[in-house]
């Protein structure tokens, strides 16, 4: 059997205790943490233990921060089981009378938080826009970092996420005019030269021909050749973040400081309940985040027969997007927890290392695997 | 705005200091033969030879190890060079008509070459320079034997005189042609000019007199003191060159009709007829004799040596030099154009005869020396200027620290292979090599297009050929190699003799060598080629005759729907084949389909060889002679992999890409990288400039655009196996280690196999087995270029036999091992056996550069003898070298090394394990560089002559400076102090035997 390692956290126990609440009834049962199975099976199990075989329910759970989060697909089900510590609290709601707004950050604690109610008095009166519950959450392309960039610049994150769509754009050399101490100066620059019909870049509408490329995943492109920038973009293609100076400056995102959420995005599909509920969360991307949701190299345990490597998108990506807010609170999502643990483990193993090397390792584990280091 | 991302943990001053003690980048020396040589000079007094090139480089060679390099600021062709004998000075003429004076100076007690001054001849007064720019174009230069004056012959026929070494034109002395014409009889004049000055030769016994030869044929003896024509020789054939006989009673002139004439020099003032006249290769029309030398010999008739003169119709395309002595005659037949030649002979004026000892011929692609004292005039093996490119280099491989036993066996085999034709010592032995004798022997192996592998001694400054392994004789080829040169019959005319080894034509491109791997402890070698041939060879000191044992391995593994469209596999010879002492084949594995081998590795302890092509990889047990594993890596949609190397699709794609690159190049060439300004790197720059000038420049370029698309799984050629690696490590569980084999492909896949290798006792009963342990798919899908396992201490695992023979510390098998996987884009260290990512560095994402070459090197500290670090060194597609720590993968330092446009230079780079590297700067030259502060191989030499009083005393200065520079000279042996003492003594000895005199220095 092929078993895919998803960097299982080492603290994993044998089984997970589940406490499920439907109406006023509680049910307790346990799951094998290493083999939680599929969401469909879990859903069936819940219906079985609550003896509600014909009632459609919404499944939610309380995560470690006390947020009520939905369980409606394999990914968030796995996440729920993995993060359960030690108990997985599951809440069932009849679909007919479900309160969709219940899901999200602080949802479980909000009721008690008087302050938040005072600050947002309209919270109760005007229910937030009901969000859909897609079968799979997935990250989509968006404009990000509006608050830190000058208005003339735009930072675009292109998510390919296993879709068949090509990224679909071309870049070229060109020149742009810069203001320098010596006056205006023509400097070489990199520009978007063409968008492919039906490609990701074209369909998101976030990039346009003749936009000047300023940065690729946080690294400035000035002084780099077209070939270098091409290679940088391809190397980052799983999660490409391009900072451009749009050729057309009329569609710039304006930040009105009074309401932070208004500048979030032109693409409303990106925002999920998280941001509606907590406008103070900014979408700044952190280097950890860039890296954490990145590719996980696939390791296939060998069997006697050679296996063909299947082409599968990284499953962890969707989980990470769901817990984006967690990340911004300074907690790392699953992937990077595992990897930093990996380095710590090494540290423990190599106690005989000389101090210099040890320090290296510590530093490495501190800075996380993606921090940019310029030579 | 995003600056916080670039911030790195504060620079640790202690680490910075340590870095300085470990790493230093130096381009040290060029090995091989200068590309496009254009002129040659020889200093008989201090025994130095100079070769200059079309790119303006000047290289001076003396005794082995004595080398100097200089470069003219103007990257112009050097048309002539002349040593100021005994002064360590050199005059060079460029094709822009400028004259440059070079001087071998002393700096830090080592000699080096530098340009002192230059001069461009002004136009003739009274003439409009714009209308007659060629009037003062210098055609010949002659230095007076007293070295205070140079005579310049010009296109306009005038002869100018130049003071030396100040390079000042002596205005009043100029001899114009009209002055000469006054003394020429009217019937000879016929109203025509005499033409350019073709030759100037000083009278051998009377330095006041100069023989001047004009293009039209007139030769005259000019008395400088009397300012008058002393003798006239009315030649009627267009003149090419003249040469004195030593006694000055006669001289010889060569002509454009392929003939030469001997003229008497006696009291009769005007001669119309020569003593003798002959056309050696007549009677049919012959080509011109470009240069002729007349050398008298005590033992017999004088030597007449000339270039050219071949019958135009039948041999007009040959590049020949003829040596004649009485009835003896040999026509040396070269494979490339003759540039120039000189003889090494007696220059003592007391001697009656020239007694030439050797003839040195510079042809376009090599230097050939002929022993003129041994009957039969055999050639002398050169200790430097190795013709690396005698057949095009297809791959190179370096091994450090060769055990002395194997070293001697290789040398011995090489000697038997090439019985030295001449016992003569290398005739050019000026200067003194001060570099310490290398303690560790380094071997550079070059694989060639014609199926040969050449072994070079790369331990010191001069790269010496040691041994040549031919693989062509194992296979049936169209032209059988054993009878390549039919022995020249006596009746053949002209009496041709093939000399030199430059032979760029390959009989069968399938023979080309692609990959080499050598085990220095077991003297086993694996050589893999273009037609999927993998040859396991073993060193044998005896001649042997054997039948080839062979096997083929199907790498497609019954994959349906693929048809190989490339070349056939090579057919091995049947029956007994005889092999000379040296590396002899032990087993031949042929891959099916016969695509070029792209990776090979050898484990001699397990007697296994692994090989890969664009279709898959295999492991073969050459002890029991059976395949252990074959695995297909081909992607089902890959169509290109089945095309041969000469595929049209591929070449079209390639040429398109190249033309794009070229357009790019022309646009970026303005902003060139500035590399360290060593003369060596300047030579490269100049080479590159010349190459760029060669093609027409695109004036208006259409904007180039690049598509941004991630690599997909079904990219073509994704199945190419890029690297293979054997390691004894933990693959399946953390408690049992065992033999493993790792393979990486173009698509970012890594396959790790656990091998069952039976112990030596059971070798005959059991066979080796391979079980797939792990498959790793790097999600970024970049080609995997290198795999290495690091032991519990983070050090690379030692090579086979290194531990069992006590040559390396046993690897740490207690701690957890990790595997370093290097793709073109990222470095990653994974733990073993779980394969979880531990550390990584994303080079391409950060730098926009891609990994081209990789090495794991050991860097000893210059400050402490017992401190060293293992580091990862990579060369990128931009030509820069990065050094990283392992296993931390922290970037340490970056150096510009190769111009990024120099794609073949980057592709040819090889690293040594001790912090050095080589790359081709032209098809015939390796640049050597070092990244280590301790392991540096660079010329340390001194050219001595008795210095004037005010000159720095070389002995004391050497002593002082050695202490200061000693670490740099140290060849990683830790005994540098002792050596510097030895040099001190030897230089003292060298100084004592100096013969020539130092004249005044230019201020």
Image (cartoon, coloured by chain):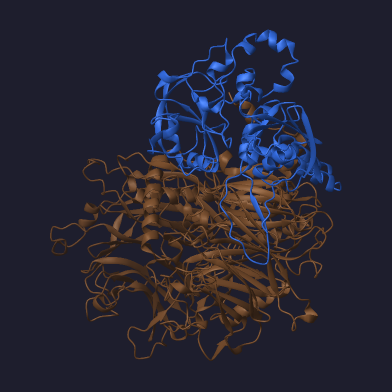
Chain colours: A blue, B brown
The location of residue B552, given as percent across then percent down, is 55, 78
Q: Nearer the viewer, residue A205 or B22?
A: A205
Residue drawn at x 43%, y 44% as measured from the top left: B118
Task: Give A196 or A16, whichever is nearer the viewer.
Answer: A16
Q: Position of residue A163 (x, y in %)?
A: 50, 42
Decide: is B606 above or below B25.
Answer: below
Q: Is residue B558 above or below residue B924?
A: below
Q: Residue at x 78, y 54 (%)?
A: B977
Tell which of A124 and A56 is nearer to you: A56
Q: In the image, is B89 to the left or to the right of B292?
A: right
Q: Is residue A139 visible?
A: yes
- The location of residue B189, given as percent across then percent down, is 16, 61
Instruction: State the image quarter where residue B802 is shown.
Output: bottom right
Q: Nearer the viewer, residue A321 or B707?
A: A321
Q: Quadrant of residue B1?
A: top right
Q: Is residue B217 above or below residue A211?
A: below
Furthest toward the right, the residue is A352
Q: Is residue A292 left or right of residue B387?
A: right
Return the x and y of residue B106 as percentages of the image width and height: 61, 49
Can I make out residue B997 in this image?
no
Q: Is residue B38 left or right of residue B896?
A: left
Count of number-bearing discs: 0
Residue visible at 68% across and 81% down in the picture: B624
């Amino acid at each position: 059997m092929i078993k895919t390692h998803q960097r299982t956290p080492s603290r994993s126990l044998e089984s997970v205790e589940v406490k499920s609440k439907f109406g006023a009834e509680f049910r307790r049962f346990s799951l094998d943490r290493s083999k939680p199975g599929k969401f469909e099976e879990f859903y069936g199990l819940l219906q079985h233990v609550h003896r509600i075989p014909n009632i459609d329910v919404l499944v939610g759970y309380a995560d470690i921060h006390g947020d009520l989060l939905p369980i409606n697909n394999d990914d968030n089900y796995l996440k729920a089981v993995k993060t359960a510590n030690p108990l997985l609290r599951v809440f069932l709601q009849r679909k007919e009378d479900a309160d969709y707004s219940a899901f999200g950050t602080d949802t479980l604690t909000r009721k008690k938080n008087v302050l938040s109610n005072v600050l947002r008095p309209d919270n109760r009166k005007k229910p937030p826009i009901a969000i859909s519950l897609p079968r799979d959450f997935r990250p989509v392309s968006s404009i990000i970092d509006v608050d830190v960039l000058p208005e003339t610049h735009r930072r675009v994150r292109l998510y390919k996420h296993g879709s068949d769509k090509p990224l679909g754009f071309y870049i070229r050399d060109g020149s742009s005019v810069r203001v320098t101490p010596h006056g205006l100066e023509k400097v070489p620059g990199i520009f978007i030269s063409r968008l492919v019909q039906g490609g990701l870049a074209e369909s998101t509408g976030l990039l346009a021909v003749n936009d000047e490329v300023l940065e690729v995943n946080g690294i400035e492109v000035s002084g780099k050749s077209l070939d270098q920038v091409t290679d940088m973009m391809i190397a980052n293609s799983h999660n490409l973040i391009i900072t451009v100076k749009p050729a057309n400056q009329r569609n710039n995102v304006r930040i009105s400081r009074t309401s932070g959420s208004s500048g979030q995005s032109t693409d409303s599909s990106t925002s999920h309940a998280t941001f509606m509920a907590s406008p103070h969360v900014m979408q700044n991307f952190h280097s950890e985040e860039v890296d954490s949701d990145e590719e996980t190299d696939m390791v296939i345990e060998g069997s006697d027969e050679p296996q063909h490597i299947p082409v599968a998108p990284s499953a962890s990506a969707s989980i990470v997007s769901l817990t984006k807010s967690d990340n911004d609170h300074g907690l790392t999502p699953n992937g990077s927890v595992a990897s930093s643990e990996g380095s710590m483990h090494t540290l423990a193993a190599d106690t005989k290392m000389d101090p210099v090397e040890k320090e290296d390792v510590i530093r490495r584990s501190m800075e996380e695997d993606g921090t940019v280091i310029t030579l | 705005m995003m600056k916080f991302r670039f911030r790195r943990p504060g620079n640790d001053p202690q680490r910075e200091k340590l870095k300085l003690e470990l790493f230093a980048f130096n381009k040290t020396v060029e090995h091989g033969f200068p590309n496009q040589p254009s002129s040659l000079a020889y200093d008989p007094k201090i025994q130095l030879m100079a070769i200059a090139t079309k790119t303006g480089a000047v290289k001076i060679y003396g005794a082995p190890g004595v080398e100097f390099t200089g470069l003219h600021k103007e990257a112009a062709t050097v048309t002539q060079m002349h040593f100021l004998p005994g002064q360590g000075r050199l005059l060079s003429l460029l094709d822009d008509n400028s004259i440059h004076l070079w001087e071998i100076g002393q700096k830090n007690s080592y000699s080096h070459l530098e340009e002192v001054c230059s001069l461009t001849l002004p136009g003739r007064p009274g003439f409009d320079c714009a209308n007659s720019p060629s009037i003062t174009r210098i055609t010949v230069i002659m230095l007076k034997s007293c070295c205070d004056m140079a005579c310049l012959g010009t296109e306009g026929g005038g002869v100018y005189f130049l003071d030396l070494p100040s390079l000042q034109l002596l205005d009043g002395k100029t001899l114009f042609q009209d002055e000469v014409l006054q003394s020429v009889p009217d019937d000879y004049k016929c109203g025509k000019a005499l033409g350019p000055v073709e030759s100037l030769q000083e009278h051998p016994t009377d330095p006041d007199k100069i023989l001047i030869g004009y293009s039209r044929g007139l030769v005259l003896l000019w008395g400088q003191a009397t300012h008058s024509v002393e003798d006239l020789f009315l030649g009627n054939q267009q003149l090419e060159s003249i040469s004195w006989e030593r006694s000055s009673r006669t001289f010889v002139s060569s002509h454009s009709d392929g003939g030469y004439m001997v003229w008497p020099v006696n009291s009769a003032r005007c001669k119309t007829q020569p003593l003798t006249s002959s056309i050696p290769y007549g009677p049919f029309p012959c080509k011109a004799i470009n240069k002729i030398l007349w050398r008298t010999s005590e033992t017999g008739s004088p030597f007449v040596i000339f270039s050219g003169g071949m019958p135009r119709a039948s041999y007009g395309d040959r590049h020949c030099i003829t040596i004649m002595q009485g009835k003896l005659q040999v026509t040396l037949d070269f494979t490339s154009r003759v540039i120039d030649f000189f003889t090494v002979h007696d220059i003592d004026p007391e001697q009656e005869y020239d007694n030439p000892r050797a003839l040195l011929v510079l042809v376009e692609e090599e230097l050939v020396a002929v022993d003129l004292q041994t009957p039969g005039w055999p050639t002398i093996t050169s200790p430097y200027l190795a013709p690396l490119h005698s057949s095009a280099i297809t791959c190179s491989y370096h091994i450090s620290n060769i055990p002395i036993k194997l070293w001697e066996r290789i040398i011995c085999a090489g000697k038997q292979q090439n019985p030295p034709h001449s016992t003569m010592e290398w005739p050019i032995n000026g200067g003194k090599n001060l570099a310490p004798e290398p303690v560790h022997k380094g071997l550079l192996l070059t694989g060639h297009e014609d199926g040969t592998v050449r072994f070079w001694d790369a331990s010191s400054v001069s790269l010496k050929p040691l041994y040549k392994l031919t693989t062509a004789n194992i296979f049936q080829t169209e032209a059988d190699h054993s009878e390549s040169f039919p022995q020249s019959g006596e009746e053949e005319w002209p009496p041709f003799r093939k000399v030199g080894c430059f032979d760029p034509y390959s009989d069968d491109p399938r023979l080309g060598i692609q990959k080499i791997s050598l085990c220095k402890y077991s003297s086993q070698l694996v050589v893999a080629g273009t037609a999927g041939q993998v040859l396991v060879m073993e060193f044998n000191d005896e001649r042997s005759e054997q039948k080839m044992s062979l096997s083929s391995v199907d790498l497609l593994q019954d994959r349906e729907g693929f048809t190989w469209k490339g070349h056939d596999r090579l057919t091995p010879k049947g029956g007994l084949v005889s092999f000379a002492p040296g590396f002899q084949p032990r087993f031949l594995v042929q891959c099916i389909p016969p695509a070029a081998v792209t990776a090979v590795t050898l484990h001699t302890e397990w007697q296994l060889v692994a090989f890969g092509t664009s279709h898959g990889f295999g492991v073969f047990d050459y002890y029991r002679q059976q395949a252990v594993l074959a695995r297909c890596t081909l992607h089902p949609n890959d169509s290109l992999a089945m095309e041969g190397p000469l595929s049209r699709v591929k070449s079209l794609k390639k040429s398109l890409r190249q033309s794009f690159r070229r357009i790019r190049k022309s646009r970026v060439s303005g902003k060139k990288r500035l590399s360290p300004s060593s003369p060596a790197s300047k030579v490269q720059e100049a080479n590159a400039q010349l190459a760029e000038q060669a093609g027409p420049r695109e004036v208006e370029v259409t904007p180039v655009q690049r598509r941004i698309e991630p690599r997909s799984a079904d990219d073509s050629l994704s199945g190419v196996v890029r690297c293979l690696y054997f390691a004894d490590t933990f693959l399946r569980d953390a408690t049992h280690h065992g033999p493993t084999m790792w393979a990486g492909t173009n698509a970012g896949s890594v396959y790790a196999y656990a091998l069952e290798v039976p112990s030596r006792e059971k070798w005959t009963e059991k066979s080796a087995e391979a079980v797939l342990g792990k498959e790793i798919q790097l999600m970024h899908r970049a080609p995997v270029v290198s795999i290495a396992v690091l032991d519990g201490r983070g050090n690379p695992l030692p090579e086979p036999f290194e531990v069992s023979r006590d040559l390396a510390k046993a690897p740490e098998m207690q701690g957890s091992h990790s595997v370093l996987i290097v793709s073109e884009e990222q470095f990653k260290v994974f733990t073993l056996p779980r394969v979880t990512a531990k550390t990584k560095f994303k080079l391409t994402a950060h730098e926009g550069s891609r990994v081209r070459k990789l090495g794991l090197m050991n860097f000893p500290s210059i400050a402490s003898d017992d401190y060293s670090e293992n580091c990862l060194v990579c060369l990128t597609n931009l030509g820069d070298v990065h050094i990283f720590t392992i296993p931390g993968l922290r970037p340490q330092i970056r150096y510009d090394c190769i111009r990024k446009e120099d794609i073949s230079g980057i592709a040819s780079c090889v690293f040594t394990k001790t912090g050095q590297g080589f790359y081709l700067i032209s098809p015939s030259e390796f640049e050597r560089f070092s990244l280590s502060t301790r392991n540096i191989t660079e010329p340390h030499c001194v050219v001595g002559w008795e210095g004037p009083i005010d000159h720095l005393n070389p002995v004391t200065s050497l002593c002082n400076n050695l202490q200061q520079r000693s670490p740099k000279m140290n060849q990683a042996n830790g005994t540098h102090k002792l050596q510097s003492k030895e040099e001190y003594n030897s230089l003292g000895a060298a100084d004592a035997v100096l013969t020539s005199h130092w004249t005044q220095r230019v201020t």
